[in-house]
Amino acid sequence: MSRRSATSSGHPKVCACPSGLDPYRLPNHVAVIMDGNGRWAKARGLPRMVGHRAGVEALKRTLRLCSDWGIGALTAYAFSTENWSRPGDEVNFLMTLFERVLQRELESLEREKVRIRFLGDLEGLPAGLQELISEATELTVRNNGIHFNVCTNYGGRRELVLAAQKLAQRAARGDLDPTLIDENSFEAELLTAGEVDPDLLIRTSGERRISNFLLWQLAYAEIHVTDVCWPDFDEVALTKALFDYQSRCRRFGGLDPIAANHLGS
């Protein structure tokens, strides 16, 4: 399990986070399952697409807050491999929305020194979106601000299968002794290689499952579930999640509690 800092300095960045939160005990890495866009829209008598647009604004808001408060990485579950089963018009809308948002926000991401990566089976995405993803990744790869990982056409089980296949291929070529395969060598083949594991998983809209998301990486993450639908997820909701996180005693399988804090130093 990786516990390195997601920031370039390797030490927590102290910022003006909300009163009562300990800036030295913020998570290094927050992962979010952004659930409830459709339910949010339905409750207001609006099309589901309006909920997805509002969800984009919530993600921008959350990224800004995490960056301002010194959280080193944010990983968002944007589109799963299972989401292709949704109605075709909704899937097409989401793909177009991803393209438009990335085109519109890329300059701002670069200006704020955000490093963005897209994790998933990117070859399954529309060609135009693939090109934008490649451009954004290359443009921001050397940025030293918050790491922003967008899981797109992503499935946790598929990620594990692909990692196992890569190790098997290396072993078959004689480049790897199978008896030397350990957690570190397996982790190096994951899409998140080089990134600190999430300390905190937030799921919105009250659902209590991880939905095939970061199955390896969430092994020791604290889990916070809120009834707030994703479009309404704001500073108050994020602050509550962080207070919940800081109230936990993390043992990592041992007997002695370890207060939830940065483990990268």
Image (cartoon, rainbow, N blue to C red):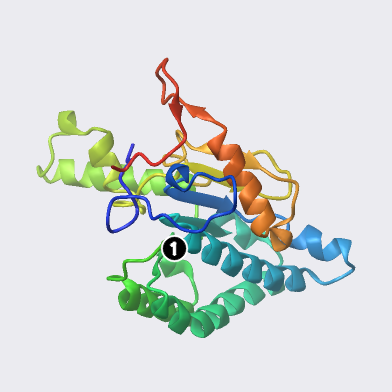
The residue that appears at 42% across and 75% down in the rendered structure is 112
Residue 225 percent location from the top left of the image:
66, 42
- Res 142 → quadrant: bottom left
**In the figure, 182 relative to 17: above or below?**
above
User: Few, some or many C-alpha atoms within 10 Å of disc 1 (few <14, some 14-19, many ≥20)?
Assistant: many
The residue that appears at 30% across and 45% down in the rendered structure is 4
- Res 42 → quadrant: bottom right
Q: Say left or right for 8 vs 125.
A: left
Count of numbered circles on the image: 1
Residue 39 percent location from the top left of the image:
80, 58
- Res 211 → quadrant: top right
The residue that appears at 33% across and 56% down in the rendered structure is 7
> Which amino acid, mark 1?
Phe
Depth check, front residue: 185 or 142: 142
Name the secondary structure under disc 1. Answer: strand
Q: Residue furthest top?
A: 255
**Rendered-image quadrant of the C terminus:** top left
Depth check, front residue: 42 or 200: 200
Residue 140 percent location from the top left of the image:
34, 74
Q: Residue furthest left?
A: 174
Residue under label 1, please give it: 148
**Rendered-image quadrant of the N terminus:** top left
The residue that appears at 35% across and 73% down in the rendered structure is 137
Residue 200 percent location from the top left of the image:
51, 43
**In the figure, 177 relative to 130: above or below?**
above
Visible residue check, residue 210: no
Depth check, front residue: 15 or 76: 15
Visible residue check, residue 64: yes
